[in-house]
Image (cartoon, rainbow, N blue to C red):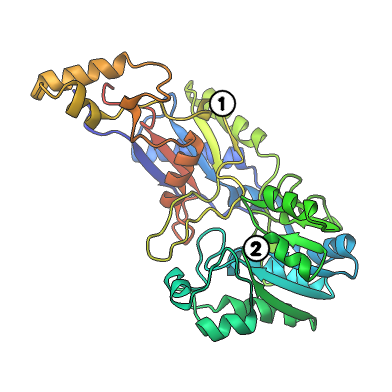
Amino acid sequence: MERVIGTVTRGLRAPIINQGDCIPEIVANTVLNASKMEGFNIDDRDIIAITESVIARAQGNYATIDAIAKDIISKFDEDTVGVIFPILSRNRFAICLRGIAKGAKKIVLMLSYPSDEVGNHLVDIDLLDEKGINPWTDVLTEEQFRNSFGYIKHTFTGIDYVDYYKSLVQEYGIECEIIFSNNPKTILNYTKSVLTCDIHTRTRTKRILKASGANKVYGLDDILSTSIDDSGYNEAYGLLGSNKATEESVKLFPRDVQPVVDAIQAMLKEATGKTVEVMVYGDGAFKDPIGKIWELADPVVSPAYTAGLEGTPNEVKIKYLADNNFAHLKGAALNEAISEYIRNKESDLTGSMVAQGTTPRRLTDLIGSLCDLTSGSGDKGTPIVYIQGYFDNYTK
């Protein structure tokens, strides 16, 4: 019988993960049990994806704001610290800022505008036009910002992030000056010691600052890149990818995750004889049309994955074939012509017109977005996602 279903994505319910739990064993057992209970087969090239959060929990990869503060002191001593380009997030950055403030003597907080790096807006871009403000050249003080735009709360969270971030710093009795600029060199008019908090543009920002006369330049990826007093750490990403755990601590991005995905693949191979692909995923990358946020606050979508998930899709556009190559055909003849074309398509369609309109992104980024939307970030309780048919096409 002809198959009538393509890709199927299932969010699998799993136990609450605690420190010390064996993630490969839990994931393998969850998949095998779901297969038995729900009646689906495990096949070659199926995909198992695990959210980074539960792996970090199992590793116990946590750190307190005291550990953050100690690392800040070791790097900046008693300098005024320019904290630039943080994202606007209670979950992602607020606790980090508390740790930074606890270790600093004075902070100059420089916010990008009209939005942060991942699309959270401080002010609607149309208001900039109305006020004649150019975000690429104009530097605003807090007073100038308020005079122009007043007090604006975030669309979804209801938070005025300017006031909120300032209050977090002032909790520790230190001075916090806020400015608004999109040029990293602006901060050097206030201090030569800079902590850049951007995620995906951090390498460029560091380069510009160092070339422009900064004395000390660190990024969030340099904070807790090693353990402080037995704290958690991440040698590659530091505080990037961290989330609020408690009011006094953060959960860091997991480390040493390649052995985890390899072990899960091996366990499923032993149990079923099938070679499944396995990946760890964090934030996907998709833009919300109302709030404008595009979600990707983790340093990467997938920090580890098995070899079969390397690369990008190699797909043709069916509607292009139907409208162009086989516009003269209909019905069964059209179906067979397109199927035959797909069966014999080139192994690398890069630059081919027949591939135009297909999504030019890495497989792990595409699958990570699918998984992030499937598992959500709330109370679904499905930190494991099982995907079938992702590598199928019209001929299967």
Residue drawn at x 78%, y 62% as measured from the top left: 194
**Which quadrant holds residue 105?**
bottom right
In the image, 86 versus 34, the foreground residue is: 86
Nearer mark to the viewer, of 2 and 1: 2
Pointers 2 and 1 in contact (C-beta within 8 Å)? no
Seen in the picture, residue 159 relative to 196 is either above or below; the reply is: below
Q: Which residue is mark 1?
A: 307
Q: Position of residue 70 (x, y in %)?
A: 85, 64
In the image, 49 versus 130, the foreground residue is: 130
Q: Position of residue 256 (x, y in %)?
A: 70, 39
Q: Is residue 311 left or right of residue 40?
A: right
Which secondary structure lies at badge 2? loop
Distance from disc 2 to disc 1, alpha carbons, whole Å, reads 35 Å
Q: Is residue 231 visible?
A: no
Seen in the picture, residue 389 relative to 100 is either above or below; the reply is: above
Q: Amino acid at mark 2?
A: Phe
Q: Residues within 10 Å of mark 1 (few under 14, many from 20)?
A: few
For marks 2 and 1 on the same chain, the one whose residue lies earlier in the sequence? 2
Residue drawn at x 47%, y 34% as measured from the top left: 363
Seen in the picture, residue 324 relative to 22 is either above or below; the reply is: above
Residue drawn at x 90%, y 66% as measured from the top left: 77
Q: Which residue is mark 2?
A: 85
Which secondary structure lies at badge 1? helix
Q: Amino acid at mark 1?
A: Ala
Q: What is the quadrant of the C terminus in the image?
A: top left
Q: Position of residue 290 (x, y in %)?
A: 38, 65
Disc number at residue 245?
none
